[in-house]
Amino acid sequence: MTARGRGRGGWQQAELPSSDDAVAWFAGRLPDDWFTGAPEITCDRDEIVVVGELPALGTEYPDTDAGRADAAAAESGRISRFREDTRDRRIEIARQAEARYQRKVAWGARVGGTRELFTNVSVPVMTRLRQPERAVLDTLVDAGVARSRSDALSWSVRLVGRHADEWLGELRAAMSRVDDLRAQGPDGS
């Protein structure tokens, strides 16, 4: 990506191809026997994440600590098998998607209560924090909740995201509506 100039928030990145059709593209591209239903596909500026549900285990495990541990181990094993068995095809599909959408593709799978992501991207984000915000991060590090300020910031973002899902969903819907209105407006010529 190349910088295109300063915008309201600082330097802006060049426009990426739209990922609006990514769900449909993957639906047409993924083998029918990989997942039990349509995979969950999420896109942002950096990455497309594809997570599919694998067939349930055929074995019942007792509702005890040992049984739950055995079920989790079996589910993790099922996901590992899927990862190994599909590696070459996933790489091929990811290369095609990366060329089409100019974003990395990450994969994951879930079965039962286990969800695992593999090959996902960790993107550095630079921010400027004043002393009160740094003190929050340092408290998380000092308390052993996080290993570093970076880890503490990531933990904080996950926590906010978990507790603000409804509000963030409304904000994304409003932003989508603004994009729709912009597309309907004059082209400036």
Image (spheres, rainbow, N blue to C red):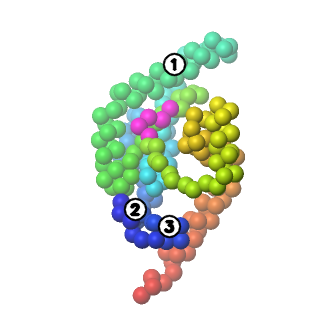
Q: Which residue is mark 1?
A: 74
Q: Residues within 10 Å of mark 1 (few under 14, many from 20)?
A: some
Name which residue type carries label 3.
Gly
Under circle 2, the secondary element is loop
> In screen coordinates, is 56 left or right of 133?
left
Residue 151 visible in rendering: yes
Which is closer to the viewer, label 1 or label 3? 3
> Going by the picture, which residue comes out furthest to the front?
131
Image location (x, y in percent) of residue 133: 66, 51
The residue positioned 50% from the left and 51% from the top of the image is: 125
Which label is found at residue 16?
2
Disc 3 is placed on an element classified as strand
Task: Report the Cα–Cα distance between label 2 and label 3.
Answer: 18 Å
Could you classify mark 2 by the number of other residues whose Cα lies within 10 Å: few (under 14), some (14-19), or many (20 or more)? Answer: few
Query: Residue sitting at 66 percent across and 59 percent down?
Result: 170
Rendered view: 83 above or below 175 = above
Q: Residue furthest bottom?
A: 189
Q: Nearer the viewer, residue 142 or 6?
A: 142
Give the alpha-carbon distance from disc 1 to disc 3, as whole Å: 48 Å
Q: Which residue is mark 3?
A: 10
Amino acid, disc 2: Leu
Which of marks 2 and 1 precedes in the sequence?
A: 2
Name the image quarter holding the C terminus: bottom left
For this view, does 136 lie left or right of residue 86? right
Of callouts 1 and 3, the N-terminal one: 3
Q: Secondary structure at mark 1?
A: helix
Image marks 2 and 3: residues in contact by CB distance under 8 Å: no
